[in-house]
Amino acid sequence: MFNLKFILMAWAVLFSPGIVVAAQGVEDTQIRLAQVAALDGPAAALGQEMRLGMVAAFEDANENGGIHRRRIILESFDDGYEPDRAIAHVKSLIEGDKHLGCIGAVGTPTSAATQPIATKADMPFINPFTGAGFLRNAQLGNVFNVRSTYAAETEAWIEYLVDRQGMKTIALPYQDDGFGRVDLAGVTAALEMRDMKRVAEGTYTRNSLAVKRALLEIRKAKPDAVVMVGAYKPVAEFIRLSRKLRFNPTFVNISFVGSKALATDLGPDREGVIVSQAVPFPWDTSVPVVAQHQEAFAAIAGDTKPGFVSLEGYLTGRLAIKALEDAGKDLTRTRFLAALRNLGSIDFGGVTMQFGPDDNQGMDDVFLTRITQDGGFVSVE
């Protein structure tokens, strides 16, 4: 009799009007989102800067009353840019059932490992920091991208180097995994459209700086340009060693490299290195959303300067906020997913995203930039 009474009382408390059961990251006063990304190791700056950008967006919303009176909390988990660690974290998040969705993952190999798990669980998977094509399949239903594809970036490289600069020989060092092979395919396709082939290539292992063998192989071919696929640490090592060997082709990098981290790591060897970007200049305050990013970023990051990655993180945060607002005050994961699937066209102030039933990628832009002697960035135009 006591047990039955206890059960009935517990049931009444849990389901009384006005009482919200904490489930899937939704509570009376807060919403929990999870980031699984590299926060340590050779790709750490990418995960950390993505986090800062998202936190800037969330804290700005929180300071203005939250979303339907709930604060947004972002909890980040370090996968070290290793798929096995990423899988363990995402499985734990799904089993724990204490987060509304995953947001701001970093990398192709980690996303390739975790996206199927999140999709099977119908867990929102919002803007992983990668341009891999497999994430652009709108039929996945739970994946929503902000940025353009790596295929668009690699085409922009070759269009600039070959069509506009008249270069004849292109070489490619790349990370020997899914990330590298995606961009290898993109470069190959762009060259084949112009009846060209790579004159040399070389690989290195993820999370290592062992690039010397690839460099020596590529140097033999004396290419006009070296287009590079990797995170900032090994890329910086490759360029530094090249400069020491007086090997100075045009170096071009994918947006994933982490522009600000690369410029800092390279120091005096950085001038002239080209990086393609998936977001506008993070210092161009004539773009309203960039000005908003700068203000929100300064409020949470102190003396740390914003960059291309933090701006992408901020736009990722703003996208999540828009969907949370649209989902309404009676928030559930199902309603959040429905809101994400019905985003349509969104103008964040100088940056427009367009989603549709067959399009889960908001932006298609690619911007080519060049690192200056002082570590800044200018357009190659």
Image: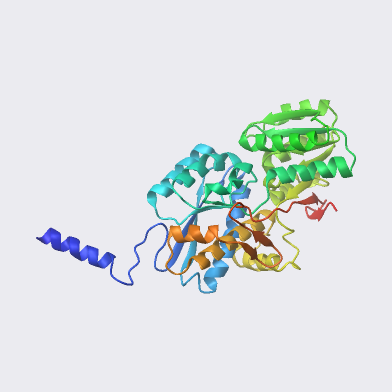
Q: Say which of 328 and 198 sits in front.
A: 328
Relative to 90, 368 lies left or right? right
| Residue at the spot 56% in from the left edge and 43% down from the top edge | 111
Question: Residue at position x 73%, y 46% from top?
Answer: 152
Where's residue 358, x and y in %?
60, 51
Residue, x 61% and y 35% (percent of image)?
178
Q: Position of residue 347 (x, y in %)?
A: 66, 66
Q: Quadrant of residue 151?
A: top right
Q: Please, which residue is most extreme toward the front here? A: 357
Q: Is residue 4 left or right of residue 258?
A: left
Residue at 60% across / 61% down in the picture?
344
Quarter of the figure that contains the N terminus: bottom left
| Render colour scheme | rainbow
Taking depth in this image into account, of 211 and 313 the one nearest to the observer is 313
The answer to whether residue 13 is above or below residue 23 is: below
Q: Please determine whether, in this image, residue 328 is positioned above or below residue 32.
A: below
Asked if residue 302 shows in the view, the reply is no
Q: Is residue 166 above or below residue 215?
A: below
Q: Residue furthest right?
A: 166
Residue 110 placed where, x, y %?
Answer: 55, 41
Q: Residue 277, can we see it?
A: yes
Q: Residue placed farthest to the bottom in the image?
A: 64
Q: Position of residue 323 (x, y in %)?
A: 54, 63
| Numbered label tally | 0
